[in-house]
Image (spheres, grey):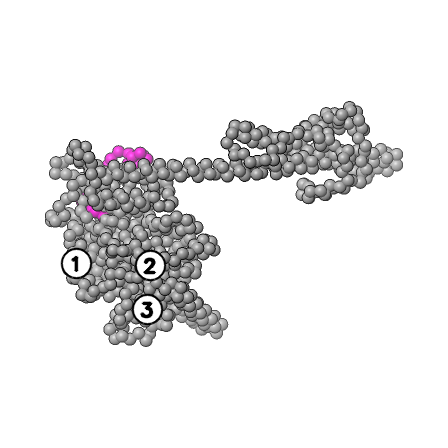
Amino acid sequence: MYACARCNPEPGTSLPLAPPCWDYVVARGSVASQGVWRGIGPAESVMKGRSCWESGTVRSLCNSGCLSKLNKDDSGDEEPTSQSDRSELQGTLKILVSKLDDLSTCNDLIAKHGAALQRSLSELEGLKVPVEGGEKIKAVNERATLFRITSNAMINACRDFLDLAETHSRRWQRALQYEREQRTHLEETIEQLAKQHNSLERAWREAPTLASTTPIAPTINKEGSERLLKEEASDDEDTEYFDAMEDSPAFITVTATESTQHRRSQSNLSGASGGQSSDWNQDNHMSPSYNDVCGKELQPRRQRRTHVPDKPNYSLNLWSIMKNCIGKELSKIPMPVNFNEPLSMLQRLTEDLEYHELLDKAARCDSSLEQMCLVAAFSVSSYSTTVHRTAKPFNPLLGETYELDRLEEFGYRSLCEQVSHHPPAAAHHVISQRGWTLWQEITIASKFRGKYLSIMPLGAIHLQFHNTGNHYVWRKVTSTVHNIIVGKLWIDQSGDIEIVNHRTKETCQLKFSPYSYFSRDVPRKVTGVVADSGGHAHYILSGTWDDKIESAKIVQSSRGGSGSEGKQKTVYQTLSPKLLWKKYPLPENAENMYYFSALALTLNETEEGVGMTDSRLRPDQRLMEDGRWDEANSEKQRLEEKQRAVRRRREAEASDALDEGREYEGYQPLWFHQRRDSVTGETNFVYKGGYWESKERQDWSMCPDIF
């Protein structure tokens, strides 16, 4: 006899024993599916509570009505804003915890009675006497009944839990959505406050320092006002902000004045040029001046174009194209020309020469340290055109070339060639009649990560001056394009550049600070130190990569106290800073011409006599520049398919040669060959000659047909 000790309406009411042949299905310790328990009648009991089981009596077994009753609110229409709603949610959570306790208790009981049932069955198998067998069979039946009732209790408790969860699922979803909206609203509010705070700080920093000594209201000059308005306008765009990641400056500069009063700055551009500007016309052999840099000895003999057709306004579903590109190499993604600008990567590489006059000036320097300052300014100037140029240049076809012949105008000739397609690599060689030669091999490693695109140029840039033999080597920093999917595209440069003069062992350490909304430094800041072979600093460089670079001669240095981060900083006393480089203003209507600079506007201008593989002759790029984008997309697909067919043919020839035991020479560039660099020890492509001679003869018979 079994009795419910807690809720049976009549104490001692017996429950009929179930037959020993009840069925159940269990899969991996849990019920396989709902409704697999068969033969469960309405008189069967469900466990409630954590009471112990006693011989001959089932304690803690009760009908399903004995479970805790639950007031279910099926409406779920109220917002979780009132105190009663919060209390109801807390009560629901407590009930769920109680249900979990019931499930745990049922699980323990099932394990206990299952073990007892197994022991009884084992004893039954070992019996020999029929009388004892009858008693044991009866015990087995009792154990089986207990196990069956406990299992039913488990099933009913699970069903109650499921019903409760389903009842409140809508309310929880609404509560979660409400919390998300509140969090988004709070983030937007904080962002607006931070923008206002940053704008006020910037306005305060731009105000003249003499405002405190004059009764009139502080004014901002025209240039500072325009820059402030531009920065405020850019801050209002949808951009992605990051916490400050840059390291604290490792040095402090103190500018020496005539009255020997020192003004200290945290290695910031404002500290270098915030006071009265010095006389740039005075002769000072301690620091290079800007006047000689900006003047051009020869005026262009040919009138170059000053505009390109305006960029069409075509709409495009960006997400439909980008969603299948995450994690792939950018060079392997088939992109429509809507994301491009009408220039190839070879032409973008040639844009590094926009401020070539810095190298002309450096070639005339007697001091290698002054020369290093100008080389550092040249390395920074190559990024000035990228601040608004978020469009992707065309990937060059294998064997594509680009020449820039400015021999008569500026004394130099430049040649680029795409020497590899996977991975994409371009070789560049420039020789100048004004005393310098530059060469580089750049391989672009890029990754698209959904929200941003990282572009990592790999390869060293070499610069050698003819009269002294000074050989400089440096590498580019990482470029990051943010807000690829949503928001306004913007580009940032971050990382370190080490420029080494391998003849004198002098170095320059440049730091490109990543943009941080919460940083007090000017955006796009660049700082640097020029040191001799012994590590003694001689010049401090400061500025921004999108505007200007200044240098200041160090006259004295000393170890200062520890900073806020516990790092000991060096205090440099310097002379007044000298302007090394300043960015040229963009042409009029540049925003409708892909933000091209004056040089970029001329790069794709048609010229006679160029090689058959020159980027100017690429049809899809020309069609895009003319505004015929649909035709450009079709032509781009044709060129890419033609290149794939040539690659498949080369792979087939290589396979045939391998089968026949012959050596197969793969693709070899036409104007460059691989050589081991004696300075860096790296193997890279260098110019082997012959291009300009072929141009003079107008003999391009050796050029492949790639277009």
Residues marked 3 and 1 touching at CB (< 8 Å): no
Asked whether 78 or 407 is in front, the reply is 78
Q: Position of residue 646 (x, y in %)?
A: 42, 70
Q: Position of residue 381 (x, y in %)?
A: 26, 53
Q: Residue 541 carries which label?
A: none
Q: Give the range drawn in magenta.
A: 549-568
Q: What residue type is labelled 3?
A: Leu
- Dot 1 corresponds to which residue? 296
Report whether residue 400 is seen. Answer: no
Name which of mark 2 and mark 3 comes first in the sequence: 2
- Dot 2 corresponds to which residue? 311
Q: How crowded is mark 1: few (under 14 residues within 10 Å), some or many (20 or more)?
A: few
Residues marked 2 and 1 touching at CB (< 8 Å): no
Q: Mark 3 vs mark 1: give the one in front.
A: 3
Q: What residue type is labelled 2?
A: Lys
Q: Is residue 54 depicted above or below 673 in this figure?
A: above
Cα distance in 3D space between marks 2 and 3? 20 Å
Query: Which quadrant of the figure has residue 649?
Result: bottom left
- Dot 3 corresponds to which residue? 617
Report whether residue 486 is seen. Answer: yes
Q: Residues within 10 Å of mark 3 (few under 14, many from 20)?
A: some
Query: Which quadrant of the figure has residue 623?
Result: bottom left
Task: Answer with left or right where residue 583 lies relative to residue 153.
Answer: left
Q: How many dots with numbers?
A: 3
Q: Mark 2 vs mark 1: give the one in front.
A: 2
Residues marked 2 and 3 touching at CB (< 8 Å): no
Cα distance in 3D space between marks 2 and 1? 32 Å
Quadrant assignment for the N terminus: top right
Name which of mark 2 and mark 1 comes first in the sequence: 1
Q: What residue type is labelled 1?
A: Lys
Task: Answer with left or right where residue 348 lies relative to residue 176.
Answer: left
